[in-house]
């Protein structure tokens, strides 16, 4: 582990504090400073699927935002494919998909997916071909001419995922992308995402509140704890590459769910953790 360019993401000793309101010079937790992340280190390998789970306020979104260069660490370093987070953003090394699909209502589905390519001046033909490929990848080939409001929530989310894949990123950053979907759609989207990742080879950092979702999708589940935000445990999920629907009824899947639950609550699982769903 010496060459950091071998990692999709490398987070070393990252601390992130937010000053309390009304006190810009706040220095300690006693005067309102929030330690969102405290000395967090984590690496994600190319092609690896890593979920972040933990109670509300443990710093999951903050960690994802630091990787995506939407904020800066107070201390420590974040690198993406061996570059600074800023340089990786400039080089479009990753795609981002957050909870609300964030589609532009006045653009068609195809035009939404095309947007990153248009912004970065890809040629018309290349754009058209790539959009057709992405529509097919997310199973929406017949919907390119529709507008977002004409699609279901799950279909909109698939459009958002297609858009995040437009520039063939080697890394996807996803913050509860399926949080607003009903359970059946959510499970279908999880299977779609597994398939898409297998086809594209992208690494994923995925924030979720759902233990089964984390286990179904991930190679490793990072369990975090709040105040201050820290990594409590990293649970490897040894379910292999075959993540079909039957896996949800497999004893190995239940063992993974139990392992993550125990890491969250301390074994044996006793009470519910605020902000984490067992379903
Ligand atoms: N811009 C900000 N200004 C001040 N405090 C912030 C800011 N962003 C996050 N925080 C605080 O940092 C801590 C971590 O927040 P974060 O959103 O990363 O948690 P989370 O684990 O994603 O929570 P949730 O599961 O509820 O989405 C929280 O205490 C939050 O209030």
Image (spheres, rainbow, N blue to C red):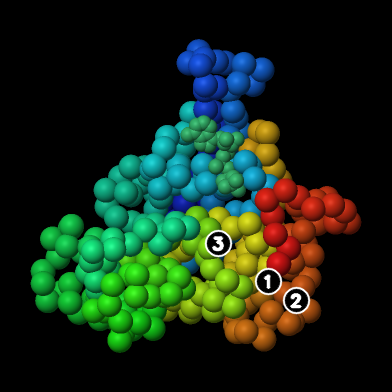
Residue 59, x across and y down, in percent: 58, 42
Is residue 13 placed above or below 107 in the rendered structure? above
- Label 1–label 2 contact, CB within 8 A: yes
Front residue of 16/178: it is: 178
Q: Which residue is mark 2?
A: 252
Q: How many marks?
A: 3
Q: What residue lies at 58% left-to-right and 23% top-to-bottom? A: 33
Q: Secondary structure at mark 2?
A: helix
Mark 2 residue crowding within 10 angstroms, few (<14) / some (14–19) / many (20+): some
Front residue of 147/178: it is: 147
Q: Which residue is mark 1?
A: 238
Q: Which residue is mark 3?
A: 179
Q: Earlier in the sequence, mark 2 or mark 3?
A: 3
Q: What residue lies at 39% left-to-right and 53% top-to-bottom? A: 81
Would residue 141 be found to the left or right of residue 53 on screen?
Answer: left
Mark 3 residue crowding within 10 angstroms, few (<14) / some (14–19) / many (20+): some
Residue 71, x across and y down, in percent: 41, 37
Q: Secondary structure at mark 3?
A: loop
Is residue 123 placed above or below 94 in the rendered structure? below
Q: Which mark is residue 265?
A: none
Q: Secondary structure at mark 1?
A: loop
């Amino acid at each position: 582990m010496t060459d950091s360019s071998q990692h999709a993401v490398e987070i070393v000793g990252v601390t992130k504090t937010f000053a309390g309101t009304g006190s810009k010079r706040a220095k300690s937790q006693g005067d309102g400073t929030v330690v969102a992340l405290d000395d967090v280190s984590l690496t994600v390998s190319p092609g690896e699927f890593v979920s972040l789970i933990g109670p509300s306020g443990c710093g999951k979104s903050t960690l994802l935002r630091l990787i995506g260069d939407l904020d800066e660490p107070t201390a420590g370093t974040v690198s993406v494919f061996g570059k600074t987070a800023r340089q990786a953003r400039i080089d479009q090394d990753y795609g981002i998909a957050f909870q609300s699909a964030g589609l532009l209502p006045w653009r068609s589905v195809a035009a939404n997916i095309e947007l990153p390519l248009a912004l970065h001046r890809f040629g018309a033909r290349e754009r058209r071909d790539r959009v057709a490929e992405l529509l097919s990848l997310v199973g929406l080939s017949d919907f390119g001419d529709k507008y977002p409001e004409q699609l279901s929530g799950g279909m909109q989310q698939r459009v958002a995922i297609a858009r995040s894949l437009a520039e063939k990123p080697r890394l996807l950053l996803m913050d509860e992308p399926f949080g607003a979907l009903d359970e059946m759609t959510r499970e279908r989207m999880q299977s779609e995402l597994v398939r898409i990742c297998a086809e594209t080879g992208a690494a994923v950092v995925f924030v979720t509140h759902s233990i089964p979702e984390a286990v179904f999708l991930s190679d490793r589940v990072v369990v975090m704890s709040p105040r201050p935000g820290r990594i409590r445990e990293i649970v490897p999920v040894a379910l292999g590459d075959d993540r079909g629907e039957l896996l949800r009824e497999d004893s190995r899947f239940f063992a993974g769910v139990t392992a993550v639950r125990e890491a969250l609550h301390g074994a044996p699982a006793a009470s519910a953790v605020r902000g984490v769903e067992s379903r």
